[in-house]
Amino acid sequence: MANQAKVILQTETLEAVADRGYFSSSEILACQEADITVTLVKTMTSSAK
């Protein structure tokens, strides 16, 4: 989706935000290869406080 936005906006760089649990490592790699900066939410690994 971010790559499509980059094409439509006709820009060289783009920044995207990925919601927790709604992304995959292959999508993040594809963004990196397309020169799209991705900000990821820190994953929750424990419910302990």
Image (cartoon, helix red, strand yellow):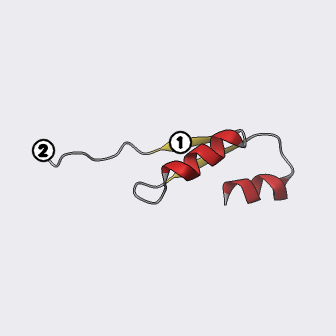
Is residue 7 visible from the viewing direction of this image? yes
* Looking at the image, residue 23 lies above or below residue 12: below
Q: Residue at x 46, y 55 (%)?
A: 19
Judge left or right: residue 9 versus residue 16.
right
Q: Residue at x 56, y 46 (%)?
A: 28
The amino acid type found where label 1 is placed reads Thr
Mark linked to residue 27: none
Q: Which residue is drawn at 59% across and 44% down?
A: 29
- Mark 1–mark 2 Cα distance, whole angstroms, equals 24 Å
Q: Do the residues labelled 1 and 2 touch (CB within 8 Å)?
A: no
**Residue at the right extreme of this rendering:** 10
Q: How many labels does the image show?
A: 2
Q: For numbered disc 2, what is the local secondary structure?
A: loop
Please name whichever residue, 25 or 39, is drawn nearer the observer in this view of the structure.
25
Q: Position of residue 43 (x, y in %)?
A: 34, 46
Q: Position of residue 1 (x, y in %)?
A: 67, 61
Crowd around label 2: few <14 · some 14–19 · many ≥20 (10 Å): few
Is residue 36 visible from the viewing direction of this image? no
Please name whichever residue, 9 or 23, is drawn nearer the observer in this view of the structure.
23
Judge left or right: residue 24 versus residue 7.
left
Residue of label 1: 39
Judge left or right: residue 34 versus residue 30.
right
Residue of label 2: 48
